[in-house]
Amino acid sequence: MSVSGFCVKLFHVKTELTSSPGRAARFIKAGGIVAFPTETVYGLGADVFNAKAIAKIFEAKRRPADNPLIAHVGELGQIDKLAAEVPDAARRLFESFFPGPLTVVLKKTVRVPTIATAGLDTIGIRMPSGKLAREFLAACGTPVAAPSANLSGRPSPTTWQAVFEDLDGRVECILQGGATDIGLESTVVDCTGERPAVLRPGSVSIEELQSIVPEIGSHQDNRPSAPRSPGMRHKHYAPRARVIVAASPAEIADAGNAAYIGIEMPSDNVAKMLICSSAEEYAREIFAFFRECDRAGIGTIYCQRVEEKGIGAALMDRLNRAESR
Ligand code: TXA
Ligand code: MG
């Protein structure tokens, strides 16, 4: 298959499972691709400056070539290698939220190969806070370009087993950590326009962002001129089962082959259900629940609507996308 001019043949590779970040980093240094845990979801990484290795990511995930990757840094000093300019708003975001579940889009340097950014002259930069991610990035010694480690269109993986389910035989190594803490992908903020704007909601909420940079626009602002996150055009986060976002647990029909996830108990019996004690827990569990339902052959998954504040905004974004697929 040809991705942006690179011919990559990914034969069935042996996927090594390891819990050693140093061992996983050796694959990156050798031009391989490695799935690794972060505090949000598992990522599928390659050396950001190695265009051939990055082409393998697109091939392994079957990711559309027009969807740019996020560069993960282990230390703030690496940002200068990636970003041509760092506006004041971005600097304030780094100070407040790095390391953490926030991606900041900036103008890229010429050193970053365009395959990593899907031809854009900008690059998303994030410094994960997960312990294993930080040890892995330190051992790599280079920024690591990484999308979520799922097959394109599938729910993002929150366990190494979910990565294995999608990518066994397609990646050189999986760094095995526990289940991820947050369960939804990072908040993406574009800092290249006149006014910074959220492109994808995540666990750093709009309220938290605006407390540091008041002028940040929310992802719901209707601004046709605003830059879009290319990934948001693609189908995402969807299980094979039909997803219905329900305002109340009383909406459940077809309960025979249905599943339910929410905060309140459903009124009907369902084949599978998960009651969460908070929106945070709901967010942490949703993708694993989608995958579990698919394995169990569930036909319809009812997901209770939550209030769109804090992580609830990101959770509702993912649920709405899964429903409208
Ligand atoms: O939490 C996360 O962000 C996870 C972990 C692994 O870090 N990564 C992740 O990557 O979710 P991915 O590729 O699945 O989603 C990246 C999103 C996509 O919607 C993509 O279009 C957007 O970020 N993005 C990346 N670079 C961009 C850029 N230069 N301009 C606009 N949007 C960008
Ligand atoms: Mg993804």
Image (cartoon, rainbow, N blue to C red):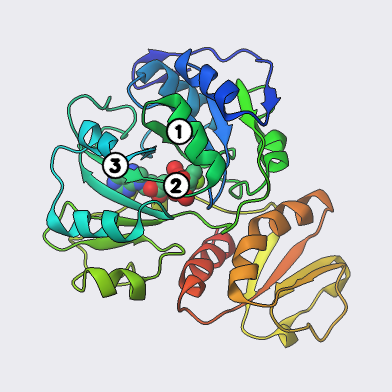
Q: Give the residue displayed 40% in from the left and 53% down from the top.
A: 232
**Image vertical order of residue 279 relative to residue 237, above or below:** below
Label 1 element class: helix
* Quadrant containing the C terminus in the rendered view: bottom right
Please tell me which residue lies in front, 292 or 66.
Answer: 292
Instruction: Give the residue pinned by disc 2.
Output: 128
Q: Is residue 67 left or right of residue 111?
A: right
The residue type indicated by label 2 comes to Pro
Tell me whether the residue at label 1 lies in contact with that at label 2, contact meaning CB atoms closer than 8 angstroms.
yes
Task: Give the mark nearest the N terminus, 1 or 2.
Answer: 2
Instruction: Give the residue pinned by disc 1.
Output: 137
Task: Give the mark nearest the N terminus, 1 or 3.
Answer: 3
Tell me whether the residue at label 1 lies in contact with that at label 3, contact meaning CB atoms closer than 8 angstroms.
no
Gap in Å between the C-alphas at discs 1 and 3? 12 Å
**Image vertical order of residue 237 relative to residue 250, above or below:** above
Characterize the local packing of mark 1: few (<14), some (14-19) or many (20 or more) Cα atoms within 10 angstroms.
many
Q: Give the residue displayed 31% in from the left and 35% down from the top.
A: 117
Q: Is residue 148 left or right of residue 290?
A: left
Please tell me which residue lies in front, 242 or 74.
Answer: 74
Please tell me which residue lies in front, 189 or 76.
Answer: 76
The residue type indicated by label 1 comes to Leu
Q: Position of residue 126 (x, y in %)?
A: 36, 46
